[in-house]
Amino acid sequence: MGDFNDIASAGEASPRAGSRFVRAQRFRDRLAQCGLHSKESLGCAFTWVRKINGRVSLREKLDRALFNLSALEAYPEAKIINRPRLCSDHHPVMLCVDTSSPANRNAKPMRFEAAWLTHENFGTVFSEAWSAHSLSLPDAISSVRETCIQWNRDVFGDIFKKKRHLQARLAGIQNSQYYAISHFLQNLEVELLDEYHRALHAEELFWCQKSRQDWIASGDRNTNFYHASTIIRRGRNKISALKIGDSWVHDPADLKQHVHDFFKSLFSHKDTQPPSQSYLNLQPCLTDDDSLSLLAPISMDEVKATLFSMKGLKSPGPDGIQPIFYQKHWAVVSGTLLSFVNQALTDGYFDTSLLQAHITLIPKGESPDIIQKFRPICLLNVAYKVLSKVIVNRLRPHLQSLIGPFQNSFLAGRSTTDNIILTQEAIHSMRRMKGRIGAATFKIDLHKAFDSISWDFLLEVLVDFNIPAPLIRLIMFSISSLKLSVLWNGNELPYFQPQHGLRQGDPLSPYLFIMAMEKLSHMILSQVQTGSWKPFKVSRGGLALSHLFFANDLMLFCQASQTQIAMVMDCLSEFSGRSGLEINLAKSKLYISPNIQSNVANALSSLCGIPLTCNLGVYLGVPIIHGRSTAATYKYIVEKIQIKLASWKQSLLSFASRRILVQSVTSSIPTYSMQSVLLPKSTCDAIDSLNRKFLWGSDSNSAKLHLVSWGDVCRPREQGGLGLRTSFENNKAFIAKLG
């Protein structure tokens, strides 16, 4: 640990150091070459400050503590704390190595191990335990859990101890003086080798499951890669301290209480308001025939298709059973699952033990220091997710006619690309406006949107859409009967029952949310039709834009006048009062066309309380370009790919696995932006260079021979290539689809 006098990414400098991009890449490669990894630090994000005339001009993270994989595994509780800077221009960095015993494992929820599937007797054990209570899904799950825990303890045992035992037996056989003449020893060696290879496969599955690397199938002996990924992931996800108020808290008991109280308060009841004014009724609804079709008995094919659409090793709910266990034993569980979903649809309720869920905390950015900077994602039991997805599959075809064209999320044939391009064109037109009449664009941020929506409002929405009463009863029961427990560093905190909001992770939640947001769309359209809301015309005689939605990402357009700004805010306030959704004014942005004088624009910003900006920044993951597109604009794409193609992965992956990583993971990072914008040629070349070097095992410090030209590598597999694509040609193909 110490002062390395360099940064590892542009984000480790403020202002961002785009000019040191290559140096940062070399520094990362050097660390990877040495097998060193950096842990997240607590305290100030930057460790060095440059001052000019007493004013801060530059801040960078130059000081850090580095660990190899052995150290990460040996000291999982280690913390790096950046202490306050007192007399130097560097912050002192303190390393705390906690050698105390790990947290109580009894508080960790039980998890089914994918490695169990490699045992020849597991199928029988699972089937017998399930069949003994197959008439009741909760009883069957409970029986399987208890049986498998006992079987794992008595029969399957410790994979690593078994592997060491087999190695010792093989060594004893091969070192025996009778080995060459004993057929018994040679036959025993064959049996033990076969058992040893099964143990290796079980070990690979064990680490594959824990690494959460779902882009590559197990079976290619990538055990070391999975193990390294797991260790790094554990270190990154561990939360050892948080800022509460103005002080840092490290005590585990205080942190657990703070986190539990925060989420219990977040999901507690909030009052909503009845409508204060009337709007035109523009809402379509289901026909009676369509409504009745949603209640038709659910078929076995529907349940099977739903179950097998899930990724096998997705994180389980509190029962610990991943989808792969249901999929591998479909013949055993199918009847119980079918009976469960049909009975739930008929009754409108089911056993609440299936509605327990865990909340896992996902950081919203780098080095989150307060609990508000974590996104709560629900881990639900697979049995409930099957029911939820069956309802979604039935609702989805009807939503095409119920949800207006201004909402472009989660529906077939609609895409984020539509919103990005329309917004980009609107901003381009606004920048060219002349005359006295200007235009305004609101980029609205909803505070904790999914977590805040009112259940009473959702019920009103479902009734207005003419969703059948039995299905409404089932949906509202599923939402309101849920019990949540926060997973804090892998340990369960006490359960509590939420009183509002939708759970992120429930397949049904996004569709309920866009149905609720359609209410706001109807309110805006009502104001447009009465002439109160003046939408923005993108071109003369062209499209008049009033709003664009993508789930909770809102873009609103109107004329730049006090009357119109007040109209927009009144509409948002009305919707907020009814739905429980709060507008985060500080994080929202207001863009005024340049033909409006700055003093007028500032007055409009003061009127609505939303900060004025000359650049809307990133919208739906893509920068809204206010001028010429440059390589610097899209440097974040190259940096993301660099992180994905970290050099330490090269030595742990086979060539075939490196090809899969390049093809399935890194290609998806630029693809999203490529669908709506033509990236600079230099950006595409940089992406290809990274892919090429990773594939052949090169880095910024050492070059390896590229055995085949990149053009040949990017040929289709039928023509002798590897099926990869050059970034620039791929980008042009996406743009061609836009016409």
Image (cartoon, rainbow, N blue to C red):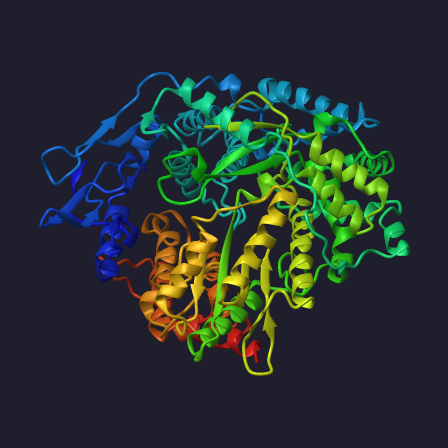
Name the side, left or right, on which 98 lies relative to 94: right
Rendering coords of residue 641 (x, y %)? 39, 57
Whether residue 551 is visible to the viewer of this picture, yes or no, is no
Rendering coords of residue 159 (x, y %)? 50, 27
Whether residue 569 is visible to the viewer of this picture, yes or no, is yes
Taking 487 as reference, is 341 above or below it?
A: below
Rendering coords of residue 206 (x, y %)? 51, 34
Rendering coords of residue 524 (x, y %)? 64, 60
Residue at screen point 85% across, 40% down? 470
Closer-to-camera residue (42/216): 42
Name the side, left or right, on which 672 lies relative to 518: left
Residue at screen point 41% across, 41% down? 229
Residue at screen point 88% across, 45% down? 297
**Residue sitting farthest toward the bottom:** 540
The quarter in which the N terminus is drawn is top left
Where on the picture, by quarter, is residue 402? bottom right
The quarter in which the C terminus is drawn is bottom right
Residue at screen point 50% across, 28% down? 262
Closer-to-camera residue (492/441): 441
- Number of disc labels: 0
Closer-to-camera residue (214/677): 677
Closer-to-camera residue (210/136): 136
Taking 515 as reference, is 144 above or below it?
A: above
Taking 637 as reference, is 151 above or below it?
A: above
